[in-house]
Image: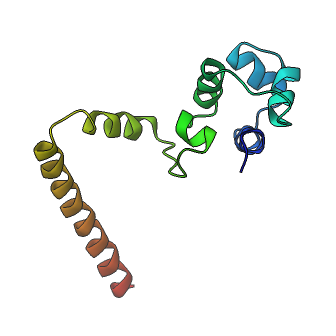
Amino acid sequence: MDLGNKIVQLRKEKDLNRDELGKAVGTSGAIIGRYERNEITPSVEVAAKIADALDVSLDYLVGNTSFLVKDKKMLYRLELLDKISEEDRNTILRVVDAFLKEAQLTTTAKKLKA
């Protein structure tokens, strides 16, 4: 999906009109419309503001990743994980994997009892 269509989709998901998104990023609704129609391309700075206003990462907005993290607290934690040693990161991931497995087992057990 191109940048313009991604902006349209995400803006509509947030129930924003072009003017509201424009105000949030410091531009006009008309300029947002031009971005959406791919007539012009926003600067990196403006694209970052658009991504922030739409609660997505800049990478997701511009199509560098299809991985969408809508929970900003989770995104912050992922960024922190990237800054620690590989050994510490692997330890944390093993703990998270154990908790996830426990949660899956609990969910499965509840379904079997129902």
- Percent across and percent down for residue 39 are 86, 31
Front in this rendered view, residue 113 or 70: 70
Name the residue at 71% across, 43% down. 6
Q: Is residue 98 above or below residue 32?
A: below
Name the residue at 33% across, 79% down. 108
Total residue callouts: 0
Q: Name the quadrant containing residue 35.
A: top right
- Percent across and percent down for residue 84 are 19, 35
Classify residue 6 as left or right of residue 91. Answer: right
Q: Is residue 20 above or below residue 96?
A: above
Classify residue 92 as left or right of residue 108. Answer: left
Classify residue 52 as left or right of residue 21. Answer: left
Name the residue at 55% across, 44% down. 64
Front in this rendered view, residue 40 or 4: 40
Q: Name the quadrant containing residue 76.
A: top left
Name the residue at 53% across, 38% down. 59
- Percent across and percent down for residue 106 are 28, 72
Front in this rendered view, residue 110 or 81: 81
Classify residue 1 as left or right of residue 114. Answer: right
Colouring scheme applied when the structure was drawn: rainbow
Front in this rendered view, residue 30 or 63: 63
The C terminus sits in image quarter: bottom left
- Percent across and percent down for residue 44 are 61, 22
Q: Is residue 31 above or below residue 2?
A: above
Q: Name the quadrant containing residue 112.
A: bottom left
Outermost residue to the right = 30
Outermost residue to the top = 26
